[in-house]
Every structure is written in structure tokens, then in C-alpha cells.
Image (cartoon, helix red, strand yellow):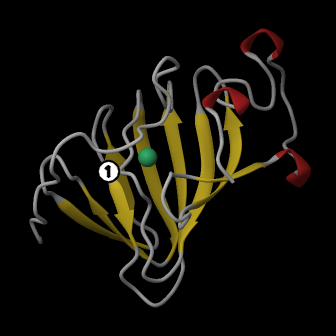
């Protein structure tokens, strides 16, 4: 399911001018598959305001998201299930993050999540203040040649 940035970014469940305490019922959760390659990163987006973006996503065994992502804000991961291998194509850095562990990805940090295990990995993410630059939207591809993995 391709998506356009303007579909929800910064205005789910309401635009900034209409903020109020709100119950996000299941029918209000936005679902989308990230990326322009075979969709292997499925998202449940809870909120996307002008200041905060929170949801969960899953990568199946052997999957990854494509292209690598980069945000206009800091991102925090909390692994709910499984083990994620996070690769930075700009630096070659790799972090293996397992259930109960936390990963911080500062603004402008390129990242690509891989699942090298045989179970689904489920990740809670929070990004503030902006998920993507409103002018550019999500990245279409990583510019340049990715670095090789630096295995920890
Ligand atoms: Fe991200």
C-alpha cells in the first residue's frame, strides 16, 4: 500500500489546530507498508502530530525495510518482540537489538532494519518532532554506495 506524506504526516488523528485529549481506537490506527521495494515493513501508526510520531512496526523473518530511512527528528526504538539488526549505510555501523532493549537513532541518522532471525520482530518507535521533512517526504533511496557492515 504506497502512501503519500500528506496522507497522515503531522495530522493524525487531527491537525495541530485541533489538538485535544483523544482515545485512539483500533479503527483510528493508520496502517501502511514503508518503502518502494517489496513491502516487508508493516506499520501501525498511532499518532503523527506536528511534534510526535509513535507506532509499531514489524519485519518478517528474512525481511528488511527498503530503502534505508532517515528522519527530521530523533527516533527511539523499544523492541517488543524478537531481534532487530540495524544497519547504518552511511557509516557501516551495525546494532543488534533484542526484546526489551532500546536503540536511539539521532536526527539525520540513516538506518535500515533487518530481521536475520526466524521469528517476526516487532518494534515500538517514537520520533520527535518530525518523522520526515515536510518538503522532501520519505527518502526514495540512500544516496551513494552503502558502506560495508561493521559487525560488532
Ligand atoms: Fe526510522
Residue occupied by mark 1: 111
Q: As rendered, which of 29 and 3 lies closer to the eye?
A: 3
> Is label 1's Cβ within 8 Å of ligand 1?
yes
The tally of labels here is: 1
In the image as oriented, which residue stretches furthest toward the top? 17
- Residue at left 41%, top 38%? 139
Q: Secondary structure at mark 1?
A: loop
- Residue at left 50%, top 24%? 129
Q: Residues within 10 Å of mark 1 (few under 14, many from 20)?
A: many
- Residue at left 49%, top 17%? 135
- Residue at left 81%, top 24%? 14
**Quadrant in which residue 152 is drawn:** bottom left
Residue 131 locus on image (x, y percent): 50, 32
Residue 149 position (above or below residue 132): below
Residue 76 locus on image (x, y percent): 43, 46
Check the picture and name the quadrant holding the N terminus: bottom right
Amino acid at each position: 500500500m504506497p502512501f503519500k506524506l500528506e496522507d497522515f504526516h503531522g495530522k493524525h488523528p487531527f491537525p495541530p489546530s485541533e489538538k485535544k485529549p483523544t482515545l485512539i481506537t483500533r479503527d483510528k490506527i493508520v496502517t501502511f507498508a514503508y518503502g518502494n521495494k517489496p513491502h516487508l515493513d508493516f506499520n501501525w501508526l498511532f499518532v503523527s502530530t506536528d511534534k510526535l510520531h509513535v507506532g509499531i512496526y514489524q519485519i518478517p523473518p528474512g525481511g528488511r525495510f527498503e530503502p534505508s530511512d532517515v528522519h527530521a527528528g530523533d527516533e527511539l526504538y523499544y523492541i517488543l518482540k524478537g531481534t532487530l539488526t540495524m544497519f547504518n549505510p552511511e557509516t557501516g555501523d551495525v546494532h543488534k537489538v533484542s526484546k526489551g532493549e532500546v536503540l536511539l537513532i539521532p536526527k539525520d541518522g540513516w538506518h535500515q532494519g533487518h530481521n536475520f532471525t526466524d521469528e517476526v520482530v516487532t518494534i515500538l518507535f517514537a520520533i520527535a518532532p518530525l518523522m520526515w521533512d515536510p518538503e522532501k517526504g520519505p527518502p526514495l533511496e540512500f544516496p551513494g554506495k552503502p558502506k560495508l557492515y561493521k559487525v560488532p
